[in-house]
Image: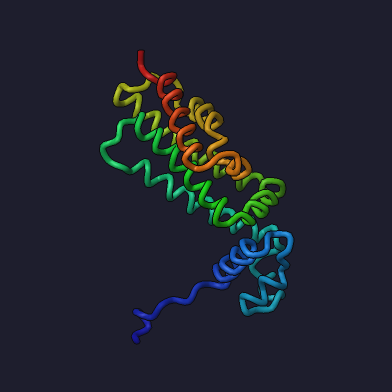
Amino acid sequence: MPASKAKKAPSNKIVILDVAEELFVEHGYRETTVSDIAKRAGMSAANLYRHYENKEDIAAACAHRCIEKKNAAMRDVLHKRKLSAAERLEEFIVALLRYTHEETQNRPKISEMIGVVIHSRPEVVHTMLSNLQSMIAEILAQGNAQQEFAVENVVDMSEIVHASIAIFCTPLFMQLYSLPEFERRAREMAKLLVQGLARR
């Protein structure tokens, strides 16, 4: 096979993150050691430390990848055609809930890693919140442009909207209700928000 068509092997940094995420999902953050990660990645701990200073660095990088994946899923809602701003806001909230619920059900131990990152690297979480609020602001701006909403400051209002839907995107709360019940509540919240945002 020509070199130009050969599949490029993933970098060591990518391999480390792939393996670390697998182990965090299987055993949890606290039960996983740097030596465990290095061993499964097929390298020495010394080689691993050339790329990451410690386990917290690895967790922060894994969390960043998880956030990017979540953001990509949420952006899909922003790019759906033929939705009013009200419909887009409702679909955004429900998509956020479904994503969080699925992650919590399928990868329950990953929340331990997120908890560590919130404590040790809050800037990673602030980036996630900022990205979600930017997407909400985009929906609010669409509503203003289409004369559905009357929002004076979409940035400030995006923070308020995000705070009001926090229960639907926080893993800790995902055990409170079944997914159908959560979806019902999410749609009711969306309707309430739209009423408050609507142009009079």
Q: Is residue 184 left or right of residue 128?
A: left
Q: Residue furthest bottom?
A: 1
Q: Is residue 2 left or right of residue 131?
A: left
- Residue at 56% x, 35% y: name it: 166
Closer-to-camera residue (57/89)? 89
Which corner quadrant holds the C terminus? top left
Q: Does residue 112 sit above or below 157 in this rendering?
A: below
Closer-to-camera residue (21/43)? 21
Q: How many marks?
A: 0
How far from the left and from the top, in percent, is residue 126?
Answer: 59, 41
Q: Residue furthest left?
A: 82
Q: Does residue 195 sit above or below 98 in this rendering?
A: above
How far from the left and from the top, in percent, is residue 195?
Answer: 41, 20
* Colour option used: rainbow
Which corner quadrant holds the N terminus? bottom left
- Residue at 58% x, 57% y: name it: 107
Q: Does residue 176 sit above or below 108 in this rendering?
A: above
Q: Does residue 153 sit above or below 34 in this rendering?
A: above
How far from the left and from the top, in percent, is residue 171?
Answer: 59, 45
- Residue at 56% x, 67% y: name it: 18
- Residue at 49% x, 52% y: name it: 68
Closer-to-camera residue (107/140)? 107
How far from the left and from the top, in percent, is residue 117?
Answer: 67, 50
